[in-house]
Image: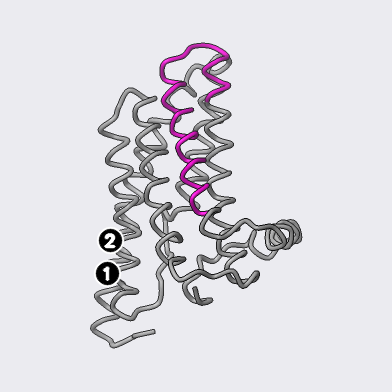
Amino acid sequence: MTGTDRRPLSSRDTGWARAVTAWLVKTSITPNQISMGSMGAAALAGAGFWGAGMSDGWPRGGLLVAAALFCQLRLLCNLFDGRVAVEGGKQAADGPFWNEFPDRVADILILVGAGLGASNPALGWAAAAFSVLTAYVRELGRANGLPADFRGPMAKQHRMALMTAAALAAACAPLWPVAGMAVTLALWMVVVGAAVTAVRRAAAVVSGLKDGRRA
């Protein structure tokens, strides 16, 4: 994984991220295992959203808070797998697969789970499909020699921030009933935002190929 292939994240160079990375590098934990862990976190986040849809009152709120926390744990796994691989020198031959495949599974688990919890599975699947499409277009560009394109407005970190905020807002529904629609609204925003993102990335790929802007 080269510098141009890494998603730009401000959290990557913070002191706490460097400290956690240094600790992980000293352990037997591999970057691939961290990447696999992101799927487990996503499964628990999706289950939290789904379970919240079948619960009422404060139990529902607790499941939504758990979903928010596991969405963030998924992002932490995404942060540290790359750091441990690059800064820790633990790259593996199959690393590129585990760097990408779990992310697509994680998007599906979280967004479909949220759709099920919101009693709108079709919306969840639509959000998942457009999210996977954004990554597909990025990788299509890379396969044709173009730099990795991480532009938004609904890249992975944006989707997870939105779903985290929606889960926390929906958890407040016992105090603020209108917040009960937060997850549905967030899924619609993911659908529209990811569609726009895919179109923007696709246009950049076509433009880059025409102009010969290869990496």
Which quarter of the rendered picture does the C terminus lie within?
bottom left
Residue position for label 2: 199
Circle 2 — which element? helix
Q: Is residue 55 above or below residue 190?
A: above
Residues at discs 1 and 2 in contact (Cβ within 8 Å): yes
Is residue 37 inside the magenta stretch?
Answer: yes
The crowding category of the residue bearing disc 2, from other C-alpha atoms within 10 Å (few below 14, some 14 to 19, many at least 20), is: some
Q: Which residue is mark 1?
A: 203
Left/right of residue 168 with respect to residue 184 in the rendered view: right
**Given the image, on which type of amino acid does mark 2 rest?**
Val
Q: Name which residue lies at 51% across and 25% down.
A: 170
- What is the span of residues highlighted in magenta in the rendered image? 35-63
Q: Position of residue 185 (x, y in %)?
A: 39, 33
Q: Residues within 10 Å of mark 1 (few under 14, many from 20)?
A: few
Question: Residue pushed farthest bottom?
Answer: 212
Quadrant in which residue 210 is drawn: bottom left
- Give x and y (percent) for residue 151: 42, 64
Q: Residue at x 41, y 16 (%)?
A: 54
Disc 1 is placed on an element classified as helix
